[in-house]
Image (cartoon, rainbow, N blue to C red):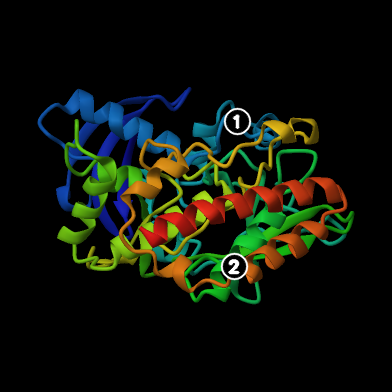
Amino acid sequence: MEYILKHKEIPVMTFEMNENNYALMGINEILDEERLPFGLKDRGNRTQYAIQFNNWLLGRGLSESRKDLTEIKKQFNAESAKELLVKAHGLNLTDHYWLHGINEKISWKEMNFFENSFDKLLPGKGKGPEIDDSVNNQSPNLCIDGSIEKRWVIKDGKRVLLKGSIYKRMQEPFNEELASEILKENNIEHVHYKLRRTEDNIPYSECECMVNADTEYINAYYVMNMEEYYRKDPYSHYLEICSKNGLTKARENVDTMLILDFLLGNADRHKGNFGIIRDANTLKWIKTAPIFDNGNCLFFDSEDNDAEEWGIDTMGKAFGDSNRLNLKKIENWDFYDKANKENIIEIITLSLQKNEKIKASRIKKIIATVKQRMDVLDNLCQQ
Protein backbone atom coordinates (compact mmCIF):
# COMPACT_ATOMS: atom_id res chain seq x y z
CA MET A 1 0.00 0.00 0.00
CA GLU A 2 1.27 3.46 -0.83
CA TYR A 3 1.64 6.05 1.92
CA ILE A 4 2.65 9.69 1.99
CA LEU A 5 4.84 11.35 4.63
CA LYS A 6 4.02 14.97 5.33
CA HIS A 7 5.46 17.79 7.38
CA LYS A 8 2.36 19.62 8.53
CA GLU A 9 0.42 20.00 5.23
CA ILE A 10 3.51 19.75 3.00
CA PRO A 11 4.06 16.43 1.13
CA VAL A 12 7.59 15.15 1.74
CA MET A 13 7.80 11.66 0.21
CA THR A 14 5.76 8.66 -0.86
CA PHE A 15 6.63 5.08 0.09
CA GLU A 16 5.26 1.54 0.02
CA MET A 17 4.42 -0.62 3.04
CA ASN A 18 3.33 -4.23 3.23
CA GLU A 19 -0.38 -4.30 4.09
CA ASN A 20 -0.01 -7.36 6.30
CA ASN A 21 2.98 -6.58 8.51
CA TYR A 22 3.65 -2.88 7.75
CA ALA A 23 7.19 -3.59 6.58
CA LEU A 24 8.67 -0.81 4.48
CA MET A 25 8.90 -1.99 0.87
CA GLY A 26 10.72 1.02 -0.54
CA ILE A 27 10.77 4.76 -1.20
CA ASN A 28 8.75 5.81 -4.24
CA GLU A 29 9.34 9.53 -4.65
CA ILE A 30 10.95 12.33 -2.66
CA LEU A 31 8.75 15.41 -3.01
CA ASP A 32 10.49 17.94 -0.75
CA GLU A 33 14.12 17.21 0.08
CA GLU A 34 14.43 20.21 2.41
CA ARG A 35 11.76 18.75 4.70
CA LEU A 36 12.97 15.17 4.75
CA PRO A 37 13.13 13.78 8.30
CA PHE A 38 15.90 15.65 10.05
CA GLY A 39 19.37 14.20 9.68
CA LEU A 40 18.24 11.80 6.94
CA LYS A 41 19.44 12.73 3.50
CA ASP A 42 18.95 11.07 0.12
CA ARG A 43 22.57 10.75 -1.01
CA GLY A 44 21.75 8.78 -4.16
CA ASN A 45 21.58 5.37 -2.49
CA ARG A 46 17.83 4.90 -2.25
CA THR A 47 18.15 1.47 -0.58
CA GLN A 48 20.36 2.84 2.19
CA TYR A 49 18.02 5.76 2.64
CA ALA A 50 15.05 3.39 2.93
CA ILE A 51 16.84 1.59 5.79
CA GLN A 52 17.47 4.90 7.56
CA PHE A 53 13.87 5.98 7.04
CA ASN A 54 12.56 2.66 8.39
CA ASN A 55 14.69 3.10 11.53
CA TRP A 56 13.35 6.64 11.88
CA LEU A 57 9.79 5.32 11.65
CA LEU A 58 10.43 2.61 14.24
CA GLY A 59 11.91 5.23 16.57
CA ARG A 60 8.60 7.09 16.57
CA GLY A 61 6.67 4.16 18.00
CA LEU A 62 6.39 2.48 21.37
CA SER A 63 9.61 0.91 22.60
CA GLU A 64 9.89 -2.87 22.60
CA SER A 65 11.26 -2.51 26.15
CA ARG A 66 8.00 -1.14 27.55
CA LYS A 67 6.67 -3.71 29.97
CA ASP A 68 3.06 -2.92 29.01
CA LEU A 69 3.60 -3.23 25.23
CA THR A 70 2.04 -6.71 24.96
CA GLU A 71 -1.06 -5.49 26.77
CA ILE A 72 -1.30 -2.38 24.55
CA LYS A 73 -1.00 -4.43 21.34
CA LYS A 74 -3.75 -6.73 22.59
CA GLN A 75 -5.92 -3.75 23.52
CA PHE A 76 -5.72 -2.34 19.99
CA ASN A 77 -5.62 -5.67 18.14
CA ALA A 78 -2.19 -4.96 16.68
CA GLU A 79 0.69 -7.31 15.93
CA SER A 80 3.46 -4.77 16.45
CA ALA A 81 4.37 -1.31 17.72
CA LYS A 82 4.81 -0.29 14.09
CA GLU A 83 1.22 -1.25 13.28
CA LEU A 84 0.08 0.91 16.20
CA LEU A 85 2.17 3.78 14.85
CA VAL A 86 0.71 3.55 11.35
CA LYS A 87 -2.84 3.37 12.67
CA ALA A 88 -2.13 6.54 14.67
CA HIS A 89 -0.70 8.21 11.53
CA GLY A 90 2.68 8.60 13.23
CA LEU A 91 1.42 11.71 14.99
CA ASN A 92 3.15 12.76 18.19
CA LEU A 93 3.74 15.81 20.37
CA THR A 94 7.42 16.15 19.51
CA ASP A 95 7.50 17.18 15.84
CA HIS A 96 5.18 17.86 12.89
CA TYR A 97 5.70 14.78 10.74
CA TRP A 98 2.85 12.38 10.02
CA LEU A 99 1.74 9.84 7.45
CA HIS A 100 -1.42 8.50 5.85
CA GLY A 101 -2.57 6.33 2.97
CA ILE A 102 -2.09 8.08 -0.36
CA ASN A 103 -5.85 8.08 -1.03
CA GLU A 104 -6.97 9.20 2.45
CA LYS A 105 -8.52 12.67 2.47
CA ILE A 106 -7.38 14.02 5.83
CA SER A 107 -5.46 17.13 6.84
CA TRP A 108 -2.89 18.17 9.43
CA LYS A 109 -5.30 20.82 10.72
CA GLU A 110 -7.93 18.26 11.63
CA MET A 111 -5.54 15.52 12.83
CA ASN A 112 -2.65 17.04 14.80
CA PHE A 113 -2.63 16.76 18.59
CA PHE A 114 -1.26 20.22 19.26
CA GLU A 115 -4.60 21.72 18.25
CA ASN A 116 -7.05 18.82 18.51
CA SER A 117 -8.22 16.87 21.54
CA PHE A 118 -7.40 13.24 22.18
CA ASP A 119 -8.12 10.56 24.78
CA LYS A 120 -8.98 11.43 28.34
CA LEU A 121 -8.60 9.60 31.62
CA LEU A 122 -11.73 7.64 32.45
CA PRO A 123 -13.65 8.65 35.60
CA GLY A 124 -12.66 6.44 38.50
CA LYS A 125 -9.38 5.38 36.88
CA GLY A 126 -6.00 6.07 38.46
CA LYS A 127 -4.30 9.23 37.30
CA GLY A 128 -1.08 7.41 36.41
CA PRO A 129 0.86 7.17 33.16
CA GLU A 130 -0.31 3.73 32.05
CA ILE A 131 -2.40 3.46 28.90
CA ASP A 132 -5.95 2.53 29.89
CA ASP A 133 -9.25 1.97 28.08
CA SER A 134 -9.73 5.71 27.51
CA VAL A 135 -6.94 5.73 24.91
CA ASN A 136 -8.01 5.23 21.30
CA ASN A 137 -5.83 4.67 18.25
CA GLN A 138 -5.91 8.35 17.34
CA SER A 139 -3.63 9.34 20.18
CA PRO A 140 -0.07 10.58 20.70
CA ASN A 141 0.30 7.81 23.26
CA LEU A 142 0.91 5.24 20.52
CA CYS A 143 3.81 7.29 19.14
CA ILE A 144 5.91 7.92 22.23
CA ASP A 145 9.39 6.55 22.91
CA GLY A 146 11.13 5.32 26.04
CA SER A 147 10.86 2.23 28.23
CA ILE A 148 8.99 3.87 31.12
CA GLU A 149 5.19 3.81 31.11
CA LYS A 150 4.03 7.27 30.08
CA ARG A 151 1.15 9.04 28.43
CA TRP A 152 -0.02 12.46 27.28
CA VAL A 153 -3.19 14.03 28.64
CA ILE A 154 -4.82 17.43 28.20
CA LYS A 155 -4.96 19.37 31.45
CA ASP A 156 -6.39 22.89 31.59
CA GLY A 157 -5.92 23.11 27.83
CA LYS A 158 -2.22 22.16 28.03
CA ARG A 159 -0.54 19.01 26.73
CA VAL A 160 0.93 17.31 29.80
CA LEU A 161 3.15 14.22 29.97
CA LEU A 162 2.68 11.76 32.83
CA LYS A 163 5.65 9.48 33.43
CA GLY A 164 6.00 6.58 35.83
CA SER A 165 8.83 4.36 37.00
CA ILE A 166 10.41 1.02 36.14
CA TYR A 167 11.98 0.03 39.44
CA LYS A 168 10.24 -1.01 42.66
CA ARG A 169 11.75 1.91 44.59
CA MET A 170 10.02 4.30 42.20
CA GLN A 171 12.76 6.89 42.59
CA GLU A 172 12.62 8.36 39.08
CA PRO A 173 9.68 10.78 39.63
CA PHE A 174 11.37 12.17 42.76
CA ASN A 175 14.59 12.62 40.81
CA GLU A 176 12.71 14.55 38.13
CA GLU A 177 11.29 16.84 40.79
CA LEU A 178 14.59 17.55 42.52
CA ALA A 179 16.47 18.18 39.25
CA SER A 180 13.76 20.64 38.22
CA GLU A 181 14.01 22.45 41.54
CA ILE A 182 17.81 22.73 41.25
CA LEU A 183 17.51 24.17 37.74
CA LYS A 184 14.69 26.52 38.75
CA GLU A 185 16.73 27.75 41.73
CA ASN A 186 19.57 28.63 39.36
CA ASN A 187 17.43 30.19 36.59
CA ILE A 188 18.37 27.51 34.05
CA GLU A 189 15.88 26.86 31.24
CA HIS A 190 14.37 23.43 31.71
CA VAL A 191 11.23 21.36 31.39
CA HIS A 192 9.71 21.55 34.85
CA TYR A 193 8.54 18.27 36.38
CA LYS A 194 6.11 18.08 39.27
CA LEU A 195 5.65 15.11 41.57
CA ARG A 196 2.17 13.62 41.55
CA ARG A 197 0.51 10.49 42.95
CA THR A 198 -2.27 8.26 41.66
CA GLU A 199 -5.39 7.47 43.66
CA ASP A 200 -3.47 4.40 44.83
CA ASN A 201 -0.61 6.65 46.02
CA ILE A 202 1.75 5.54 43.21
CA PRO A 203 4.22 8.37 42.41
CA TYR A 204 4.71 9.73 38.91
CA SER A 205 6.00 12.94 37.36
CA GLU A 206 4.11 15.48 35.30
CA CYS A 207 5.46 18.07 32.84
CA GLU A 208 4.12 20.32 30.10
CA CYS A 209 5.00 19.80 26.44
CA MET A 210 8.09 21.84 25.45
CA VAL A 211 6.94 22.45 21.85
CA ASN A 212 3.71 23.64 20.25
CA ALA A 213 1.84 23.98 16.95
CA ASP A 214 4.67 26.11 15.52
CA THR A 215 7.80 24.55 17.00
CA GLU A 216 9.32 21.07 17.08
CA TYR A 217 12.08 19.18 18.87
CA ILE A 218 14.94 17.52 16.98
CA ASN A 219 17.18 15.28 19.06
CA ALA A 220 20.97 15.38 19.07
CA TYR A 221 21.29 12.07 17.23
CA TYR A 222 19.76 13.54 14.09
CA VAL A 223 21.54 16.87 14.54
CA MET A 224 24.91 15.15 14.73
CA ASN A 225 24.14 12.95 11.72
CA MET A 226 23.65 16.01 9.52
CA GLU A 227 27.36 15.76 8.75
CA GLU A 228 29.93 12.99 8.90
CA TYR A 229 32.00 13.04 12.09
CA TYR A 230 34.10 9.91 11.92
CA ARG A 231 37.16 10.36 14.19
CA LYS A 232 35.85 13.76 15.23
CA ASP A 233 35.11 14.70 18.84
CA PRO A 234 31.29 14.36 19.17
CA TYR A 235 31.03 17.30 21.60
CA SER A 236 32.88 19.68 19.25
CA HIS A 237 30.97 18.34 16.27
CA TYR A 238 27.60 18.96 17.90
CA LEU A 239 28.53 22.51 18.93
CA GLU A 240 29.89 23.29 15.45
CA ILE A 241 26.60 22.31 13.83
CA CYS A 242 24.64 24.35 16.37
CA SER A 243 26.88 27.35 15.70
CA LYS A 244 26.48 27.01 11.93
CA ASN A 245 22.74 27.19 12.44
CA GLY A 246 22.81 30.31 14.60
CA LEU A 247 22.63 28.85 18.11
CA THR A 248 25.17 31.10 19.81
CA LYS A 249 24.51 29.86 23.37
CA ALA A 250 24.79 26.17 22.63
CA ARG A 251 28.10 25.68 24.46
CA GLU A 252 26.82 27.40 27.60
CA ASN A 253 23.67 25.29 27.64
CA VAL A 254 25.43 21.99 26.88
CA ASP A 255 28.08 22.67 29.54
CA THR A 256 25.34 23.33 32.10
CA MET A 257 23.73 20.01 31.17
CA LEU A 258 27.03 18.15 31.56
CA ILE A 259 27.67 19.66 34.99
CA LEU A 260 24.20 18.68 36.17
CA ASP A 261 24.62 15.17 34.75
CA PHE A 262 27.87 14.66 36.68
CA LEU A 263 26.47 16.16 39.87
CA LEU A 264 23.40 13.89 39.87
CA GLY A 265 25.00 10.93 38.10
CA ASN A 266 22.57 10.90 35.18
CA ALA A 267 22.89 7.50 33.53
CA ASP A 268 20.56 8.17 30.61
CA ARG A 269 21.65 11.31 28.77
CA HIS A 270 21.69 9.59 25.40
CA LYS A 271 21.40 11.59 22.19
CA GLY A 272 17.62 11.39 22.27
CA ASN A 273 17.51 13.30 25.56
CA PHE A 274 18.95 16.60 24.36
CA GLY A 275 18.76 18.52 21.11
CA ILE A 276 17.37 21.65 19.49
CA ILE A 277 14.06 23.43 18.94
CA ARG A 278 13.26 24.74 15.46
CA ASP A 279 10.45 26.70 13.82
CA ALA A 280 8.22 24.12 12.13
CA ASN A 281 7.13 26.60 9.47
CA THR A 282 10.42 28.25 8.41
CA LEU A 283 12.72 25.42 9.63
CA LYS A 284 14.90 28.05 11.32
CA TRP A 285 16.71 26.86 14.42
CA ILE A 286 15.51 28.72 17.51
CA LYS A 287 17.53 27.42 20.48
CA THR A 288 18.90 24.36 22.19
CA ALA A 289 16.13 22.42 23.90
CA PRO A 290 15.56 23.08 27.60
CA ILE A 291 17.11 20.48 29.88
CA PHE A 292 14.72 17.57 30.38
CA ASP A 293 14.52 13.89 31.38
CA ASN A 294 16.67 13.71 34.51
CA GLY A 295 14.93 10.83 36.29
CA ASN A 296 17.57 8.14 35.79
CA CYS A 297 20.08 9.49 38.28
CA LEU A 298 21.22 9.23 41.92
CA PHE A 299 21.61 5.44 41.75
CA PHE A 300 17.93 5.02 40.86
CA ASP A 301 18.48 1.40 39.74
CA SER A 302 20.93 0.27 42.43
CA GLU A 303 20.11 -1.78 45.49
CA ASP A 304 20.93 -0.62 49.01
CA ASN A 305 23.38 -3.47 49.53
CA ASP A 306 25.39 -2.18 46.56
CA ALA A 307 25.93 1.22 48.20
CA GLU A 308 29.51 0.46 49.23
CA GLU A 309 30.37 0.05 45.56
CA TRP A 310 28.82 3.31 44.41
CA GLY A 311 31.36 5.57 42.77
CA ILE A 312 31.28 9.25 41.95
CA ASP A 313 31.40 8.61 38.19
CA THR A 314 28.65 7.25 35.94
CA MET A 315 28.25 6.47 32.26
CA GLY A 316 27.94 9.62 30.15
CA LYS A 317 26.05 8.70 26.99
CA ALA A 318 25.82 12.19 25.50
CA PHE A 319 29.28 12.26 23.94
CA GLY A 320 30.64 8.77 24.46
CA ASP A 321 32.58 9.28 27.70
CA SER A 322 31.80 8.98 31.38
CA ASN A 323 30.11 11.94 33.06
CA ARG A 324 33.38 12.79 34.81
CA LEU A 325 35.44 12.66 31.61
CA ASN A 326 32.88 14.92 29.95
CA LEU A 327 33.81 17.61 32.47
CA LYS A 328 37.14 18.05 30.65
CA LYS A 329 35.24 19.48 27.69
CA ILE A 330 33.56 22.24 29.69
CA GLU A 331 34.52 25.89 29.25
CA ASN A 332 31.53 27.61 30.86
CA TRP A 333 31.20 27.02 34.60
CA ASP A 334 28.71 29.80 35.37
CA PHE A 335 25.96 27.44 36.49
CA TYR A 336 28.09 25.78 39.15
CA ASP A 337 30.03 28.93 40.13
CA LYS A 338 26.81 30.73 41.01
CA ALA A 339 24.96 27.78 42.50
CA ASN A 340 24.24 27.59 46.23
CA LYS A 341 25.68 24.21 47.12
CA GLU A 342 23.84 23.97 50.44
CA ASN A 343 20.54 24.60 48.68
CA ILE A 344 21.26 21.79 46.21
CA ILE A 345 21.89 19.36 49.06
CA GLU A 346 18.69 20.47 50.78
CA ILE A 347 16.61 20.10 47.61
CA ILE A 348 17.90 16.56 47.02
CA THR A 349 17.36 15.55 50.65
CA LEU A 350 13.82 16.91 50.93
CA SER A 351 12.69 15.37 47.63
CA LEU A 352 14.05 11.91 48.42
CA GLN A 353 12.57 12.02 51.94
CA LYS A 354 9.10 12.17 50.32
CA ASN A 355 9.65 8.66 48.98
CA GLU A 356 8.58 6.19 51.67
CA LYS A 357 10.46 3.41 49.86
CA ILE A 358 13.85 5.09 50.36
CA LYS A 359 15.63 4.48 53.67
CA ALA A 360 17.36 7.29 55.55
CA SER A 361 20.67 5.42 55.23
CA ARG A 362 20.31 5.40 51.44
CA ILE A 363 19.67 9.13 51.34
CA LYS A 364 22.71 9.70 53.55
CA LYS A 365 24.91 7.72 51.14
CA ILE A 366 23.49 9.59 48.11
CA ILE A 367 24.19 12.95 49.74
CA ALA A 368 27.73 11.88 50.64
CA THR A 369 28.36 10.95 46.99
CA VAL A 370 26.92 14.25 45.73
CA LYS A 371 29.27 16.11 48.11
CA GLN A 372 32.20 14.15 46.70
CA ARG A 373 31.14 15.21 43.22
CA MET A 374 30.98 18.81 44.41
CA ASP A 375 34.60 18.49 45.58
CA VAL A 376 35.58 17.41 42.06
CA LEU A 377 33.69 20.34 40.53
CA ASP A 378 35.23 22.78 43.03
CA ASN A 379 38.73 21.67 42.04
CA LEU A 380 38.00 21.99 38.33
CA CYS A 381 36.51 25.47 38.77
CA GLN A 382 39.64 26.64 40.54
CA GLN A 383 42.01 25.47 37.79
Checking the image for residue 20, the label placed there is none
Q: Position of residue 359 (x, y in %)?
A: 86, 47
Give the crowd class for mark 1: few <14, some 14-19, many >=20 residues within 10 Å.
few
Task: Name the kind of residue labelled 2 in the image.
Answer: Lys
Q: Quadrant of the N terminus?
A: top left
Task: Name the kind of residue labelled 1 in the image.
Answer: Ser
Residue matched to label 1: 65
Relative to residue 105, is residue 263 drawn left or right? Answer: right
Q: Is residue 37 visible?
A: no
Q: Position of residue 145 (x, y in %)?
A: 52, 43
Q: Is residue 14 above or below residue 38?
A: above
Residue matched to label 2: 341
Q: Residue 344 falls in which quadrant of the image?
A: bottom right
Pick whichever of labels 2 and 1 is earlier in the sequence: 1
Relative to residue 152, is residue 287 drawn left or right? Answer: left
Q: Secondary structure at mark 1?
A: loop
Q: Nearer the viewer, residue 40 or 296?
A: 296
Q: Residue at x 40, y 69 (%)?
A: 334
Q: Residue 48 falls in which quadrant of the image?
A: top left
Q: Nearer the viewer, residue 291 or 157?
A: 291
